[in-house]
Amino acid sequence: MFHAGSLSVPFKRLGDEFRRRTGVRVVCEASGSRLAARKVVQLGRRADVVAVSDYTVIEDLMMPEHAEWYAIFATNEMVVA
């Protein structure tokens, strides 16, 4: 999985749990969101999952040649208090 650095902790937990349940090892590689997409688009690297912190990265850089669909699985918002 290529993923945004901000997702490192939850994706490590997901990978560990997936391995525990299935015996399949998950390899996670953190970077910036745009770099995660460029690893596939420009460098030709293969990933089963590309998780970014901004869904427009998938739309702008990967679709339709390198991704057929995407899912928004979490959101947040910035608030000034």
Image (cartoon, rainbow, N blue to C red):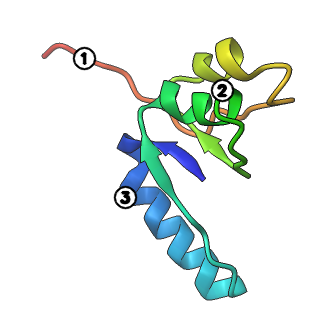
Residue 42 circle label: 2
Residue 56 circle label: none
Q: Quadrant of residue 51?
A: top right
Task: Locate residue 52, reporting x and y percent.
Answer: 53, 34
Q: Nearer the viewer, residue 31 or 52?
A: 31
Residue 79 circle label: 1
Q: Disc 2 or disc 1, which is closer to the eye?
A: 2
Q: Quadrant of residue 57?
A: top right
Hey, which residue is sitting farthest left in the picture? 81
Hey, which residue is sitting farthest front in the picture? 43
Q: Is residue 21 above or below residue 63?
A: below
Q: Which residue appears at 56% of the width and 77% of the height?
A: 17
Q: Mark 1 and mark 3: span between their CA atoms? A: 23 Å
Q: Looking at the image, tell me whether mark 3 or mark 2 is earlier in sequence order.
A: 3
Residue 9 circle label: 3
Q: Nearer the viewer, residue 20 or 28?
A: 28
Q: Looking at the image, tell me whether mark 2 or mark 1 is earlier in sequence order.
A: 2
The amino acid at mark 1 is Val
- SS class of the residue under badge 1? loop
